Image (cartoon, rainbow, N blue to C red):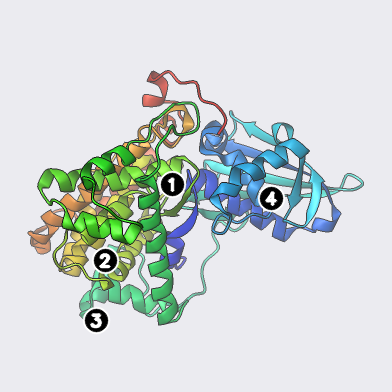
Amino acid sequence: MNRISVFDIFKIGIGPSSSHTMGPWRAAQRFTREINLDRVAAVRVDLYGSLAKTGKGHGTDLAVLLGLNGDDPVTIPVEAVQPTIDQINRTQSIQLGGKKTVPFNPQVDIVFHFDQSLPYHANGLTFTAFYDQDEGVSQTYFSIGGGFVVKEGEENASSDIILPYPIDNGKDLQHWCQLTQKPISDVVWENELTWRSATQIRKDLLHIWEVMKQCIYNGCHTEGILPGGLNVTRRAKPLAQTLIKGRVYQNADEWIRQICRGGHTFQETLKWVSCFALAVNEENAAFSRVVTAPTNGAAGVIPAVLMYHVCFSDNFQEEDIIRFMLTAAEMGSIFKKGATISAAMGGCQAEIGVSSAMAAAGLTECLGGSPEQAIMAAEIAMEHHLGLTCDPIGGLVQIPCIERNTMGAIKAITAAQIALESDPSKAKVSLDAVIRTMKETAEDMNSKYKETSDGGLALHIPVNVVEC
């Protein structure tokens, strides 16, 4: 199977969706790199399947514009996103690849094929560049979840990367941990050295945590109505203000220290965890910067659980951030290889379920659990997300998505606590068994529950969705 780095699972970008925003954005960038920009006279984009049905609510059209325009989701200032979109609409032109201006009318040149899907994946899109004299080139890409993109014709491409500890499933992971007598994070660290130096791994992981931490902080200090037409009111800020009880701080780090000094009752802790998750996904819904973990729709679970450990665990140390992320990312990789992390293919079990399993494993290791207990925690978390549908109201990553991240975070913490008090050798369900079950459940699930807004809550709540 393809080898997946921790930094493939954790990617910095812009909300609200990894499959509908980040993936199409990356596909657009790739298209501009693979064509002869000098010859291009015009461009058209065709969206299919889930990208068409929920594309407006997920900002797929906006992501495509930004990608074609040469902007990058990691570096573009959040405050520049809307002005860039406005300029494209106003001038009816786009700076293709950031280099060549061509005419582009988003209302005409982005086509939503609501009744058509491409065979390989529900998230398909085709870019066509028209050259002079009726010549041109067309390329099709698939956004397969978590910001991963596959070009048509490369669906079965394999990796030539050789890792010291190749891992495709839970059995492989357990084997290497037992053979080396190392925790999961150490095994994954050795694999990561194939791609990066030790210094770079540490630096990049801590940077990802900084982005997560700042996202939580921003979400807990921003009020208002989320865009899109559902008129969802942000709740993280008023909840955080109630919980912080007037304590003074100037930045995110001081804020965290004040949380640590505050009350640690069960109710307060539960509210803070929910607040952390709400904050991230309210930011995500507002087209702000988040970390795909492993998707944008589930971006709040892992930051919330890691922040819980930072603020409320007596034995927390900075090295736990590294260990947590390495362990969690490997779980995400195993789920991606064995099933899917795309809601358009597997429903929300593939997003919130996977993120909860990742967080449960990471927390278990940081709390002193064995590799077997961490694997067990991941299994428990997913077992209780099986069959979870993806039915976003109005095609927006808001209801039930934002609250659902709080549920995933709490389940992850519960799964870790159960695993820490259990003997994994007596477990009746293995991680690989639950992944197989998840995959089969995804295959059996009706397509209307796979990020199409054709079923579930999306049918029963009246909305007046407007273009984001």
Q: Which residue is mark 2?
A: 171
Q: CA distance from mark 1 to mark 3?
A: 33 Å
Q: 5 or 235: nearer the eye?
A: 235
Q: Which residue is mark 1?
A: 342
Q: CA distance from mark 2 to mark 1?
A: 23 Å
Q: Given the image, on which type of amino acid does mark 1 rest?
A: Ser
Q: Which residue is mark 3?
A: 180
Q: CA distance from mark 4 to mark 2?
A: 42 Å
Would you say the residues marked 2 and 1 are in contact, meaning their CB atoms lie under 8 Å apart? no
Q: Residue at x 57, y 40 (%)?
A: 60
Image depth: mark 4 or mark 3 in front: 4
| Above or below for 320 versus 90 | below
Mark sitting on residue 68: 4
Classify mark 3: helix, strand or loop: helix
Q: Given the image, on which type of amino acid does mark 2 rest?
A: Lys
Would you say the residues marked 4 and 3 are in contact, meaning their CB atoms lie under 8 Å apart? no
Q: CA distance from mark 4 to mark 3?
A: 47 Å
* First-in-chain label (4 vs 3): 4
